[in-house]
Image (cartoon, rainbow, N blue to C red):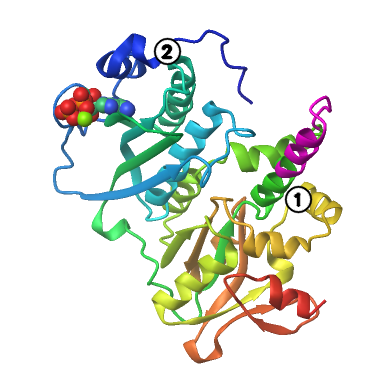
Amino acid sequence: MFEDRTKKRTELGELGEFGLIDYLTRDIVYKNESTIKGVGDDAAVINNANINTLVSTDLLVEGIHFDLSYSPLKHLGYKAAVVNFSDIIAMNGTPRQLVVGIAVSNRYSVEALDELYNGIKLACDKYKVDLVGGDTTSSISGLFISLTIIGEAATEEITYRNGAKEGNLLCVSGNLGGAYMGLLLLEREKEVYKANPASQPELEGYDYILQRQLKPEARIDIIKLLKEKNIKPTSMIDISDGLASEILHICKQSDKGCNLYEEKIPIDATTILLAEEFKIIPTIAALSGGEDYELLFTIEQSDFEIVKSLEDIHIIGHITDKNSGANLITSSGAAIPLKAQGWDALKENE
Ligand code: ADP
Ligand code: MG
């Protein structure tokens, strides 16, 4: 993962607002033709000609959305940016330009903010996004980060949440529940550390799970793969809140029901092991955990033959009529109505 941050500390006051902006944006190189003007003027200029512009914003508040005691600033910047890009990707679009607003207290040094920006810039480089502007202000306490991603998609490419049709196959990329288990692991080690600061965190062997929580990726590779195979999802959403909640969004907005098969839900072996350690049913981690940032989408049945052979895409169920409801078909064959919080339903059925 990322290297340690530097020990040097420069107070924000030494640079001042403009000095800080110059410093944080000193090495930005623009990658997209549509970026006409980036940082430095009163507004960025983007020329998307006659293609659709997609816009999405995230606002992150210290203590609510992130905890710096276990998330290094570079990871935080990387994750915040990637999660923001994921919203454009879930529309089947391409993220292009990012605008970053920060409000920061003097508890933070210039070096700390540089770490945050290093994470944001790393994500921008990886996903070929241009950081074109932002705003910088002070806060009385803590750190606030606002990210606005601008993307593009041709009209016929855009996938909405409301396009699922009866008989469509329900698909998901990657595996689920890992990010949640990573969070539980970090929280456990934080408690151990609080009780005994001399203790060493026991995080060895859990790299994959920690990465799922601290350094997630947005599945731009999946939408590229589907395009390559000439498959356009009929609906799509990214998994930020957990599989159950996202499926319910698609069903509600499409006015449909679904059958989701428990045994088809992809869960990594390390997630299962850790879930057992925490006495959590792995299916529940997948259904309710969230933050996996995988893609959930529906496809036409006629695309089955192609999709079933695609790496890292799993068919987990199908869309039904609205009156059948949204159901989880358990491994034992019982149908349980899906809830945004899958916990209760599954516990009753243990
Ligand atoms: P204004 O006073 O017009 O709001 P600013 O001094 O806030 O202008 O910003 C100057 C330039 O620096 C603008 O192009 C703005 O988009 C950019 N900028 C300001 N803060 C940030 C930031 N935190 N990250 C990236 N760019 C920023
Ligand atoms: Mg400003």
281 vs 164, nearest the viewer: 281
Q: Quadrant of residue 157?
A: bottom left
For disc 1, the marked residue is 271
Task: Name the amino acid type tagged 1.
Answer: Thr
For disc 2, the marked residue is 11
User: What span is colored magenta in the figure?
Assistant: 187-201
Q: Do the residues labelled 2 and 1 touch (CB within 8 Å)?
A: no
From the viewer's perspective, is the residue at label 2 or at label 1 nearer?
Answer: 2
The residue drawn where x is 67% and y is 55% is 177
Q: What element carries label 2?
A: loop
Estimate the x, y position of residue 340 in percent, counting from the top left. 57, 71
Task: Name the amino acid type tagged 2.
Answer: Glu
Residue 197 in sight here: yes
Q: In which quarter of the image is the C terminus?
A: bottom right
Q: In which quarter of the image is the N terminus?
A: top right
Q: In this view, does 254 lie to the left or right of 343?
A: left
Q: What element carries label 1?
A: helix
Estimate the x, y position of residue 232 in percent, counting from the top left. 40, 61
**What main secondary structure does the magenta stretch of the protein show?**
helix
